[in-house]
Amino acid sequence: MSQRQRTTRCNQEGPVELSNEPCVHRLITHSVSGREDPFRDGVRARDGKYVISGMVNRRAPFNMWSGFEAAHIFPLESGSYWIEQNYGRWIRDATPGVAELNSCQNGFLLRGDIHTDFDTYLVSVNPNDNHKITVFGLDNAGIDGRSLDPVCRDPTDPHRVSDQLLRWHFRQSVLANMRGAGEPIFEHDFPPGTDRMGQIQKEPYARERLEMEFASRLRGVV
């Protein structure tokens, strides 16, 4: 099956057409300050397992979460775009003092490597197709075609993951992968001593990435 056939099959709102619309680029998101703690803790309490691969964290009673990562669906470093598009309207469990971007409705618990693939639009979930998981490219983890675990999407749970945000991410993944070889994937594994800023300046979309890097670092000090 070709990549275009795959994206057409996975989109239940109609056929996917070739488009010049760019995807929203993003970094691999990890907590850089205590501000994400309520998000992380809420996602852990709700999910308790990898919601894509299904493995339960049996060490949770001992507060051990090695390898279990709370992943944001919409990226933290694009907060201005979130506000501009009023995506906060999709959050129904707003908590005083906690930014809507850090609602657990904007995330779920993923294995570390799948978190990286999710952030780079190589893995996504289509809520319009029974929450099926789609892998764009080689399926190293054997997850393509599975369904997102119900633990994070119980319709009776006010903290359930937002289908609107999953739909947004799936659209970005299609946009990132449907043209030619797809959008470039940002390098993130910089060995100690690397001139990180110098390397980033050589990448495609260098200006955009630098802006995201600065926004990400400012989250920890502002």
Image (cartoon, rainbow, N blue to C red):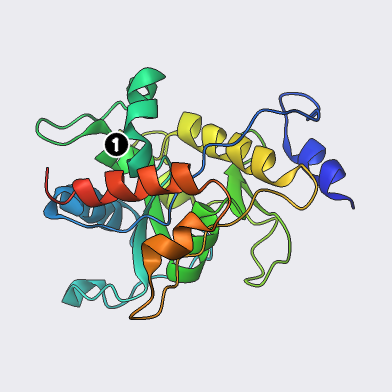
Identify the residue at the far bottom of this view.
Answer: 192
Name the residue located 63 percent from the left edge and 40 percent from the top edge. Answer: 130
Name the residue located 15 percent from the left edge and 36 percent from the top edge. Answer: 98
Query: Which residue is labeled 1 in the image?
Result: 101
Q: Is residue 211 left or right of residue 181?
A: left
Observer able to see residue 49: no
Name the residue located 58 percent from the left edge and 51 percent from the top edge. Answer: 204
Name the residue located 59 percent from the left edge and 36 percent from the top edge. Answer: 23
Q: Position of residue 141 (x, y in %)?
A: 62, 71
Q: Is residue 51 left or right of residue 58?
A: right
Badge 1, how many Cα within 10 Å: few under 14, some, many 20+? many
Q: Quadrant of residue 143?
A: bottom right
Observer able to see residue 196: yes
Query: 79 or 106, which lies in front?
Result: 79
Q: Quadrant of residue 13?
A: top right
Query: 214 or 132, which lies in front?
Result: 214
